[in-house]
Structures are given as C-alpha cells and as structure tokens.
C-alpha cells in the first residue's frame, strides 16, 4: 500500500479555523492576489490551494454554497469542468507537469478539508515529486514560493 504524506498541511489541520465559509467570503472581497483567486467565472472561480499537495495545486469552486454534487445546476457543473480544462491547460503552459490528479472529496471521511462547500482539486504531478525528503524526514520540498506560482499563473487566466 502506498501512502500520500502531507506533513506541511499540519498548519492547516491544527490551525484555528474561521467562523465562516472561506469559499463564500473570499470572492466577496477584492483581494484576489491575497486570497489566491486566479479567475472569476459566472458560476465558479479558480483559487490556489494555500496548503498545496504540490506547486500549482488549484481548486475550482462554485459560488453556490453546497456540500454535495446534488442540486447544482447543469450550467454550474458544466462551468466547473470547463474551468478544470482551462486550469489544466494553463498549468501545462506555465509549469509543464507530466500528469494531474483531479477530484472532488465529498465529506470529511472522503478527505474533504473544507467539507461544507464543494470544490474540485487540480493537482499537477511530476515523476518523482514525492521524493526522498518526504519519505525520509516528512519534509516536502516545494520548489517555488506560493506567491511566485500565483504571479506565474494569474496572467494566463487573463488570456
């Protein structure tokens, strides 16, 4: 059995959680760079994961607050997939990953860190990206600062 170790996420796991849904509140603000919002669509938006599994870890988030796929309009689900496709294309252009993990975790038992608001993950992958540092010392080497990745991707979402 293989394991995915993400010890850098302990800051999120143990950290104090806000008393509101960040996926509802962040788009109401006009601080996109600070909040890591890359693109605002009509029904969904693209945001970087503040506690990523890999550089370039993005999330597609519907504006509508739901915790399950049930009940979203066909238009919202369609836009989620269009934005997933656009995100993959932009990540390929900016970062040249060799593959991707994509998915939606519904509920805490399924791995949802924020289970009250559905979101889709897009995680770029490279051969050997879970290298010896994570295996030997539970340390993840992130080769690029989060804000450097944001600054690289943001212009591509304006195209």
Image: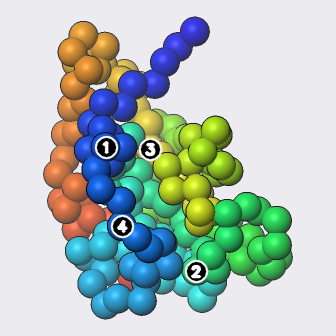
Splitting the image into 4 quarters, where does residue 34 fall? bottom left
Q: Which residue is mark 3?
A: 124
Q: Nearer the viewer, mark 4 or mark 2?
A: 4
Does 155 sit left or right of 147 as displayed?
A: right
Task: Find residue 135 and report its horizontal and vertical position in percent.
Answer: 31, 13
Q: Residue at x 68, y 70 (%)?
A: 66
Residue 116 visible within the image: yes
Check whether the beta carbons of the residues at disc 1 and disc 4 lie within 8 A of each other: no
| 10 Å crowding of disc 1: few (<14), some (14-19), many (20+) | few
Coloration of the structure image: rainbow
Q: Is residue 5 above or below residue 112?
A: above
Helix, strand or loop status at disc 2: loop
Circle on res. 80: none
**Of pointers 3 and 4, the one earlier in the residue sequence:** 4
The numbered mark at residue 18 is 4
Labels 4 and 2: the sequence-earlier one: 4
Q: How far apart in space, not on screen, are marks 2 and 1 (Cα)?
A: 26 Å
Q: Nearer the viewer, mark 2 or mark 1?
A: 1
**Disc 3 versus disc 4: distance between alpha carbons?**
28 Å
The residues tagged by marks 4 and 2 sit, at their Cα atoms, a distance apart of 18 Å
Compare marks 1 and 3 and give the one earlier in the sequence.
1
Who comes first in sequence, dot 2 or dot 3? 2
* C-alpha distance separating marks 1 and 4: 12 Å
For residue 29, which quarter of the picture? bottom left
Q: Which residue is mark 1?
A: 14
Q: Residue at x 30, y 73 (%)?
A: 35
Q: CA distance from mark 1 to mark 3?
A: 25 Å
Residue nearest the viewer, comparing 4 with 116: 116
On residue 63, which mark appears?
Answer: 2
Give the residue at x 64% y 80%: 64
In this rendering, the answer to whether 48 lies above or below 37 is: above
Question: Percent position (x, y) of residue 149?
Answer: 25, 58
């Amino acid at each position: 059995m293989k394991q995915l170790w993400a010890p850098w996420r302990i800051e999120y796991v143990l950290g104090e959680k806000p008393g509101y849904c960040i996926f509802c509140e962040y788009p109401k603000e006009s601080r996109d760079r600070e909040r890591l919002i890359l693109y605002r669509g009509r029904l969904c938006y693209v945001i970087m994961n503040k506690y990523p599994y890999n550089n370039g870890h993005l999330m597609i988030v519907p504006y509508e607050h739901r915790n399950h796929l049930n009940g979203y309009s066909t238009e919202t689900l369609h836009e989620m997939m269009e934005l997933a496709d656009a995100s993959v294309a932009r990540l390929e252009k900016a970062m040249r990953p060799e593959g991707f993990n994509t998915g939606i975790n519904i509920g805490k038992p399924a791995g949802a860190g924020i289970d009250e608001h559905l979101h889709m993950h897009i995680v770029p992958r490279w051969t050997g990206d879970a290298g010896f540092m994570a295996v030997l010392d539970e340390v993840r080497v992130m080769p690029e600062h989060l804000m450097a990745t944001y600054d690289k991707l943001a212009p591509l979402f304006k195209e």
